[in-house]
Image: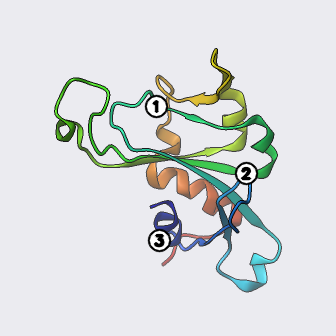
């Protein structure tokens, strides 16, 4: 899903090599003369449950490895509530969060897990296409005409 939205915005996006810790995608400018100078590394996290806690694991040691993190909430149904699974089915949503935002919201919880919590945060500036636009701006990619 993340690759599709990035490519739709004319951001050339490639899957990183397997077992590459810290990022999953490499984004570059579509103009080969400009793609040499700048690349954006993106880590992708997903949650399939609509009723998840809106948190996702991120290890502190990976902070330097990515420029953005895209978290995708697939919202395929309820799994934690005592309701039918399909009652929770709704459109997916994704957020393109800058690495600085991830660093400032990173927490180590009691169990030792390192997580980023998004519940209660105002994320409208990072939601769906608005977040993808941040990567396009960093790469200097004008909106296609």
Please determine whether, in this image, residue 91 is positioned above or below residue 136: above
Do the residues bearing badges 3 and 1 touch, measured as CB atoms within 8 Å?
no
User: Disc 2 marks which residue?
Assistant: 22
Left or right, 70 with reference to 61: left
Disc nearer the start of the sequence (3/1): 3
- On residue 8, the disc is 3
Q: CA distance from mark 3 to mark 1?
A: 26 Å
Residue in front for this viewpoint, 95 or 71:
71
Assess disc 1: are there few (<14), some (14-19) or many (≥20) residues with their C-alpha within 10 Å of its C-alpha: some
- Which dot, 2 or 3, sits closer to the camera? 2
Disc nearer the start of the sequence (2/1): 2
Give the SS element for disc 1.
Answer: loop
Q: Residue furthest bottom?
A: 32
Where residue 42 sits, quadrant-wise, is: bottom right
Please determine whether, in this image, residue 53 is positioned above or below residue 16: above
Do the residues bearing badges 2 and 3 touch, measured as CB atoms within 8 Å?
no
Disc nearer the start of the sequence (2/3): 3
Residue 5: where, in percent of width, then height?
47, 64
Residue 26: where, in percent of width, then height?
68, 66
Assess disc 2: are there few (<14), some (14-19) or many (≥20) residues with their C-alpha within 10 Å of its C-alpha: many
Say how the picture is coloured: rainbow
Q: CA distance from mark 2 to mark 3?
A: 24 Å
- On residue 54, the disc is 1
Please determine whether, in this image, residue 75 is positioned above or below residue 16: above
Left or right, 92 with reference to 119: left
Q: At 66% across and 38% down in the image, what residue appears? A: 58
- Which dot, 3 or 1, sits closer to the camera? 1
Q: CA distance from mark 2 to mark 1?
A: 20 Å
């Amino acid at each position: 899903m993340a690759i599709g939205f990035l490519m739709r915005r004319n951001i050339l996006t490639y899957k990183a090599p397997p077992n590459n810790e810290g990022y999953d995608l490499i984004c570059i400018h579509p103009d080969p003369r400009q793609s040499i100078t700048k690349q954006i590394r993106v880590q992708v996290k997903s949650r399939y449950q609509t009723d998840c806690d809106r948190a996702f694991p991120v290890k502190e040691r990976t902070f330097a490895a990515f420029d953005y993190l895209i978290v995708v909430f697939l919202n395929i149904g309820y799994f934690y509530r005592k309701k039918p699974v399909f009652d929770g089915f709704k459109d997916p949503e994704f957020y393109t969060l800058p690495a600085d935002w991830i660093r400032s919201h990173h927490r180590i919880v009691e169990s030792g897990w390192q997580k980023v919590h998004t519940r209660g945060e105002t994320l409208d500036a990072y939601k769906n296409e608005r977040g993808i636009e941040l990567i396009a701006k960093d790469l200097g990619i004008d909106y296609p005409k």
